C-alpha cells in the first residue's frame, strides 16, 4: 500500500474466547464430540427463554408496528424512563432518562467508550481481564492494557495497593474499570470494595467504568451492589444489558448510565461525544427496548432469575468441590455471573506435558499450535484434542500473567455438567504427572 493503513492498536485486538472455536470446529470434523465451555451464551448451552417472555416479544412484534422502526438515538423514552425509575429506587446516584444511552449490545458500548476517549488517556482494568475491555482499551491506546491485580488468595478481590501504585506510575490513567460480578472469576464486589475504588478515583480525579452486565446474576448469600449505590459525586459510567439476564444475547441490547456529568465539565463533554457518536449510527435496535419494561416489570421476572441463580450456585459448589481436591491447582467459589476460574499453581505446568489425542487428525491439528510460550494454552489445546472439551486459557484469553482457565456454569443438565467437570479434573491430574 502507498501508506501504512494499519491501526497502531491492531495487534491488541485478541478475543481468544471465540478464536478457540475455530480450532474446536476443526477438531469436531475429525469425529470428536465437542463440549463448548468457552463462551457465556446461556441459549447456546440449552437454557430456555421462558414462554411468558417469548409471548411478550411475540405480542409486541404482532401488535406494535413501531417495533420495526428506528428508535430515538438515546433509546426509547419508555425504556429509559423505566431504567431510571428502577435505578433511583435503589438509592445512591440519581439519574434521569437523559442519562441513559442504548447500544447494540455492550460490545458496541465498550468499543465506543474507549474509541472516543482521548488517545492520551488510559483506563486501568482488572487482571484477569475480560478481553473485550482489555483489547478495546489497548487498541485505543496502541499499547498494552494497564492492569491492577485481582487477588486469588483474597476471593479475587482487587489489590488496592497495586491499583494505587499503578495509578501513580501511569499518570495517563484517567479511569478505573471494574467488572461486577466479574468475568472470568465470578467474584462479586462487596460494597466496601467498590467504595475503596471510588475513594481512589476521587483522590486522583478519575472516573469509573463499571461493567454490570451480570448485575442480577448473583447467589450464595452475597449481596450485589451497583456502582451508583456508592459513587457519591464521582463521575462514572455503568454498563448493563439483557443478553445474560433474559437471556437474549442475540437481541444485542445494552445501555450505559452516566453518573454525575454535572460535577465535571470534561466528563460531561466526553459523555456528549459518546452520545454524538451514537447519533452517527442513528440508534440501537428497537424491539428489545420495546419489551424491556414489560419483561423486567413483570412479577414473574425476579422469581425467574432467583430460580436460575439457585442452579448456578448449585453448580458453583459442585465444581468447587471437584477442583479444590486436585493437587497443583487453586480455585475459589463463584458467587456471580456463570463462570469459574481455575489456577495452576506455580511450577505445576512444565515442558513435555501432554494428553493423548483422541485421534491422529486431532493431534495433527493442535501440533503447530503448541509452539506457544503460554503453558496454560498448551493444556487447553491438549484437553480439546483429547477430551473434546473447549475451555479458555487465562493467560491469552483474559490478558493475564496467571496460568489457568475459565469454565462456565451454564450446562443445564446437572449430571452432564458434573461429568464435564470431572473429565477436566481427570485431565489435569493426568497432564500434570506426565
Image (spheres, rainbow, N blue to C red):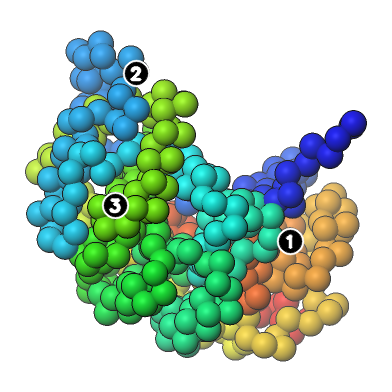
Of label 3 and label 1, which has the lower sequence position?
Answer: 3
Relative placement, left or right, of 348 versus 153 is: right
Relative placement, left or right, of 188 versus 302 is: right
Q: Dot 2, crowdedness within 10 Å: few (<14), some or many (≥20)?
A: some
Specify the label residue 70 is tagged with: 2
Mark 1 vs mark 2, foreground winner is 2
Specify the label residue 63 is tagged with: none
Q: Residue at x 30, y 31 (%)?
A: 75
Q: Dot 1, crowdedness within 10 Å: few (<14), some or many (≥20)?
A: many
- Asked whether residue 317 appears in the rendered view, the answer is no
User: In which quarter of the view is residue 326 placed?
Assistant: bottom right
* Residues at circles 3 and 2 in contact by the CB criterion of under 8 Å: no
Of label 1 and label 2, which has the lower sequence position?
Answer: 2
- Distance CA(mark 1)–CA(mark 2): 44 Å
Label 3: which residue?
261
Relative to 288, is 263 above or below? below
Q: Looking at the image, which is closer to me, 340 or 323?
A: 340
Of label 3 and label 2, which has the lower sequence position?
Answer: 2
Mark 3 vs mark 1, foreground winner is 3
Secondary structure at numbered mark 1: helix
User: In which quarter of the view is residue 315 placed?
Assistant: bottom left
- The quarter in which the C terminus is drawn is bottom right
Secondary structure at numbered mark 3: helix
Q: Position of residue 80 (x, y in %)?
A: 22, 37
Relative placement, left or right, of 107 versus 234 is: right
Specify the label residue 381 is tagged with: 1
Q: Position of residue 341 (x, y in %)?
A: 51, 71
Q: Residue at x 79, y 82 (%)?
A: 350
Q: Position of residue 77 (x, y in %)?
A: 20, 30
User: In which quarter of the view is residue 249 placed?
Assistant: top left
Relative to 276, is 93 above or below? below
Amino acid at each position: 500500500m502507498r501508506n501504512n493503513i494499519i491501526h497502531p492498536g491492531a495487534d491488541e485486538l485478541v478475543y481468544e474466547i471465540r478464536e478457540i472455536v475455530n480450532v474446536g470446529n476443526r477438531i469436531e470434523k475429525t469425529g470428536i464430540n465437542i463440549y463448548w465451555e468457552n463462551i457465556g451464551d446461556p441459549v447456546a448451552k440449552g437454557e430456555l427463554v421462558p414462554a411468558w417472555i417469548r409471548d411478550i416479544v411475540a405480542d409486541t412484534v404482532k401488535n406494535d408496528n413501531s417495533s420495526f422502526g428506528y428508535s430515538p438515538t438515546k433509546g426509547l423514552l419508555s425504556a429509559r424512563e423505566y431504567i431510571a425509575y428502577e435505578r433511583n429506587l435503589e438509592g445512591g446516584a440519581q439519574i434521569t432518562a437523559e442519562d441513559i444511552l442504548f447500544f447494540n449490545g455492550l460490545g458496541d458500548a465498550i468499543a465506543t467508550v474507549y474509541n472516543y476517549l482521548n488517545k492520551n488517556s488510559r483506563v486501568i482494568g482488572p487482571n484477569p481481564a475480560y478481553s473485550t475491555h482489555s483489547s478495546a482499551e489497548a487498541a485505543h491506546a496502541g499499547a498494552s492494557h494497564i492492569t491492577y491485580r485481582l487477588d486469588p488468595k483474597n476471593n479475587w478481590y482487587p489489590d488496592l495497593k497495586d491499583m494505587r501504585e499503578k495509578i501513580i506510575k501511569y499518570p495517563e490513567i484517567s479511569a478505573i474499570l471494574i467488572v461486577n460480578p466479574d468475568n472470568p472469576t465470578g467474584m462479586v464486589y462487596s460494597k466496601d470494595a467498590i467504595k475503596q475504588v471510588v475513594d481512589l478515583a476521587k483522590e486522583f480525579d478519575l472516573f469509573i467504568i463499571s461493567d454490570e452486565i451480570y448485575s442480577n446474576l448473583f447467589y450464595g448469600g452475597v449481596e450485589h451492589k451497583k456502582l451508583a449505590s456508592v459513587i457519591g459525586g464521582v463521575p462514572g459510567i455503568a454498563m448493563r444489558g439483557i443478553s445474560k439476564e433474559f437471556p437474549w444475547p442475540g437481541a444485542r441490547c445494552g445501555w450505559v448510565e452516566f453518573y454525575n456529568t454535572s460535577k465535571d465539565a470534561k466528563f460531561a463533554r466526553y459523555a456528549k461525544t459518546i452520545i454524538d457518536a451514537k447519533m452517527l449510527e442513528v440508534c440501537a435496535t428497537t424491539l428489545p427496548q420495546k419489551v424491556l419494561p414489560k419483561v423486567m416489570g413483570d412479577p414473574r421476572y425476579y422469581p425467574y432469575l432467583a430460580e436460575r441463580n439457585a442452579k448456578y450456585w448449585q453448580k458453583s459448589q459442585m465444581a468447587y468441590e471437584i477442583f479444590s481436591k486436585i493437587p497443583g491447582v487453586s480455585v475459589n467459589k463463584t458467587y456471580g455471573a456463570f463462570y469459574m476460574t481455575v489456577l495452576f499453581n506455580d511450577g505445576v505446568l512444565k515442558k513435555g506435558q501432554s494428553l493423548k489425542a483422541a485421534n491422529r487428525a486431532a493431534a495433527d491439528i493442535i501440533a503447530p499450535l503448541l509452539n506457544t510460550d503460554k503453558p496454560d494454552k498448551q493444556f487447553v489445546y491438549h484437553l480439546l484434542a483429547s477430551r473434546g472439551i473447549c475451555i479458555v486459557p487465562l493467560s491469552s484469553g483474559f490478558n493475564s500473567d496467571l496460568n489457568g482457565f475459565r469454565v462456565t456454569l451454564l450446562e443445564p443438565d446437572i449430571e452432564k455438567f458434573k461429568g464435564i467437570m470431572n473429565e477436566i479434573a481427570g485431565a489435569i491430574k493426568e497432564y500434570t504427572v506426565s
